Amino acid sequence: MKRRKYVLTAVMFLIAALVICFTLPQLAEPRFQVENKIRSLLHRYDLTSRADAYEIRQIMTQDPSTSRTLMWQSQDEDNRALAEIRKKGEKASQVVPATSSVFTDNGVTRHLHTAMVTGLTPGTSYEYRVGNDRKRSPWMPLETPAQGSFSALIFPDSQSADYSGWKALAQKAFKDHPDVSFFVNMGDLVDNGEHAYQWDAWFDALQGVIERIPVAPLLGNHETYTLDWKVRRPLAYLQLFQLPAGDARYAGEFYSFDVGEVHFTVLNTQDSELKAWEPNLLKDEAEWLRRDLAGTKKKWKVVLMHRDVLQYGFASRPTPREEGFSDTGRFFMPIFDEAQVDAVLTAHLHTFRDRGHIKGFRRDETGPLYLLTGVAGDVQYPGLWKQHALDKMVAPQPEDRNYLLLRASNEALEFICYDKNGRKMHAVTVTK
């Protein structure tokens, strides 16, 4: 009993001391100053791990070695949203205010928050958390790539009816290659761009990945579809991913970024869907593309685009169609030749194919390498396409989910294709 009495007495003295600490010395201070000190105490002891923050993600910037875009959502409106970042192992941190917006689509309201982190050091391990001035998420890792070699995951179309297959593929790919610097999703991230559930399912599949490494997404045709399968501007895509602006008139639709010695150019190939809103898209994008490719000093140039450059004949439809080049290919391929692009990756057709090097619309080893990246979701077209005369390798049929790993160095670009079980299907290397 005596021991219990002593413990109770000690607790009472501690409570009294805290009350005196935060009241008597502050009687002349405004209430908000007292509240700020209490918040500071909470922050010091990290009692802030229940933040209203979900679908936390890192977004690609023009130079991810020195900057990063952090985005997240909250259930409730939060005008005091912020991010906090520090070097791994250090106590001192930097607070970065976030901009906040409200986006309602498909009857779902999202409170979106974006923090732009700059001034980072290349090749450095950081950790960050997000929230507001009261509550913050747990610390999460953020790595800035150095100027040398790196690797990245490249996922083809992930659009699905059931996103469990996409989740299994993405999670296994990251588990097998945990040291990648970022990942790419080649457009058609979701089956329907207006469907809020599909976006939530896409983000859910990437938990444990997208908050650890940045995503470089592409705009696909399915991002422009309404619930009744008509066409609109890709409103959800543009709100959910605050991307670099290649051209301010088309912010977030096409952009470029540098990692190591590779300059990546991301194109928007949805000119037919967006014609009513952006009648000059192709002309303006081509002008920007020439400037972008001519302006880089990096050794390697890689183009990422959703629609494919070849046209395939149908193997399993009654409507005949001759093989050749698509309108997209005929428009962009001469620009790639002119700029001496090293590799062009495409998607849209849900099949993996290596076409080798093409220049002047024919096989030429001095031209860019063209890879059709395959399919990462459950929308698959078994036996639909004939083999093209320019196909050097076609994935085994009927086709299932796959992804690519890019290994980049000053000496070479290596593209390795893996199936959903992590088995290597194909590999090709570009040198110069």
Image: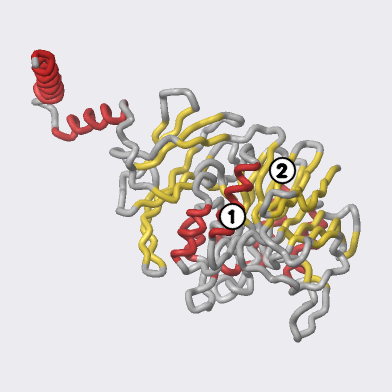
Return the x and y of residue 16 as percentages of the image width and height. Answer: 10, 21
The part of the image, by quadrant, that contains residue 45 is: top left
The part of the image, by quadrant, that contains residue 25 is: top left
For mark 2, what is the residue?
262
In the image, 427 versus 215, the foreground residue is 427
Query: Quick one: label 2, few (<14), some, or many (20+) residues within 10 Å?
Result: many
Q: 45 left or right of 252? A: left
For mark 1, what is the residue?
217
Return the x and y of residue 251 as percentages of the image width and height. Answer: 54, 58
Return the x and y of residue 107 as percentages of the image width and height. Answer: 37, 69
Q: What amino acid is at disc 2? A: Val
Give the quarter of the figure containing the C terminus: top right
Return the x and y of residue 73 as percentages of the image width and height. Answer: 39, 52
- Say whether residue 280 is visible: yes
- Say whether residue 13 is visible: no
Q: 4 left or right of 61? A: left
Q: 80 left or right of 72? A: left
Taking the spot 50% from the left edge, 35% from the top edge, the residue there is 141
Taking the spot 55% from the left edge, 57% from the top edge, the residue there is 252
Q: What amino acid is at disc 1? A: Pro
Taking the spot 63% from the left edge, 51% from the top edge, the residue there is 184
What element does badge 2 sit on?
strand
Answer yes or no: do the residues labelled 1 and 2 have beta carbons within 8 Å? no
